[in-house]
Image: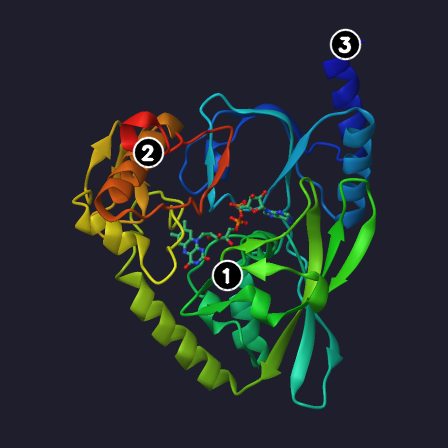
Amino acid sequence: MSRKARLKALWEGVCPGRVKENEPLGPYTTLKIGGPAEWLIEPLNERETERIIALARGEKVPWRVLGQGSNLLVSDKGIKGLVIRLWSREKPRVVRTFSDGGVLVEVTAGYSLSNLVRYGIREGLGGLEFLVGIPGSVGGAWAMNAGSYGRQIGDLTHYLITLSPKGTLTRKGKKDLAFAYRSLDLEPGEIILSGGLKLKVRPREEIRRETKRLWSSRKNTQPWDRPSCGSVFKNPPGGFAARLIEEAGLKGRKKGGAQISEVHANFIVNLGGAKAGDVVALMNRIRRRVWSRFGIVLEPEVKLWGCRLKPLWTAGNR
Ligand SMILES: Cc1cc2nc3c(=O)[nH]c(=O)nc-3n(C[C@H](O)[C@H](O)[C@H](O)COP(=O)(O)OP(=O)(O)OC[C@H]3O[C@@H](n4cnc5c(N)ncnc54)[C@H](O)[C@@H]3O)c2cc1C
């Protein structure tokens, strides 16, 4: 039996019917770009994820975690090894109430962020309103410390249950979680399985009204009609990446099928048929121009799978 066939049999033994070989990743990302994953597996629950990781470790197959692919740029050449896609409909559940009106809600990483926001409205649990309109899974939101309007999911997070690359399940409390601006310190290969969010009982109508207000203010400032991955660069300290890109005169510039959005200069949109190489070329151009005009280095917010940006510090840029 070939190694491929043996691996396939091993994965199928854990996730029957949910193992795909050479699966194009574009459709699993909001940018709709990306070559194939050697293996794409969709575990149904935490136990299956643990078992797949144990097998991958034993077989020395590298792995990556995919949520809803809303912050990803995947190489046109694709990805070697295993992509584990976490996806879940398991409803959040209240695990504890506090005397200060706080409620601890446990959520699985594969649950969708938009469903979580709806859950908060339905159950009269406030705190999630600022997440309205952010696509992705709750696990992806934790990994990216997603947020808006000066608030981020890390602020609400009481604990996370993670699976270490060695296969150990760990409950990490608030003090063990190094959330920072659009990041969480995780070991390479560590997977967030679930976590607890501290919410607050609040009248449903108030939550609904605030969610609606925040959604109205963001819906006109971002391009929703074209595939994108949200903000491509992190805001530099004290500034806004979008403003710098606009002031550098790059809004609307195109490369192949990709364009620096006319609506929000920190978004790159796929006009149709864009390649990862087109997006990378625009990102390099932005970084070079912003550096040479303003002396500011823009760091990517989007996670690059198999793609590389050119270093800024080449002789020509000094
Ligand atoms: C139109 C649009 C608007 C957006 N607006 C915002 C915004 O306002 N604020 C904001 O913060 N973001 C925004 N984003 C970016 C994106 O939605 C968030 O970063 C989101 O939290 C990513 O979740 P995901 O499930 O799609 O993660 P993915 O894109 O699938 O993955 C992102 C990273 O997280 C890792 N990851 C995913 N799940 C796990 C897990 N369970 N364990 C460990 N690592 C994991 C992946 O390996 C990858 O490195 C926007 C994106 C779009 C397309």
Asked if the beta carbon under badge 1 is closer than 8 A to the nearest atom of ligand 1, the reply is no
Residue 218 visible in the current orientation: yes
Instruction: For mark 1, give the secondary structure.
Output: helix
Residue 122, by quadrant, is bottom right
Furthest-top residue in this view: 1
Q: Position of residue 57 (x, y in %)?
A: 79, 31
User: Observer-nearest residue: 84 or 89?
Assistant: 84
* Label 3 Cα neighbours within 10 Å, binned few <14 / some 14-19 / many ≥20: few
Residue drawn at (50%, 61%) of the image: 114
Q: Position of residue 33 (x, y in %)?
A: 42, 32
In the image, what residue type sits under mark 1?
Ser
Sequence-wise, which precedes: disc 1 or disc 2? 1
Residue drawn at (80%, 55%) of the image: 170
Q: Position of residue 275 (x, y in %)?
A: 36, 27
Residue drawn at (72%, 45%) of the image: 44
Residue drawn at (60%, 71%) of the image: 156
In the image, what residue type sits under mark 2?
Asn
Q: Position of residue 138 (x, y in %)?
A: 59, 57
Gap in angstroms between the C-alphas marked 2 and 3: 41 Å
Left or right: residue 19 compared with residue 272: right
Which residue was labeled with disc 1? 114
Q: In the image, which disc is placed on residue 284? A: 2
Sequence-wise, which precedes: disc 1 or disc 3? 3
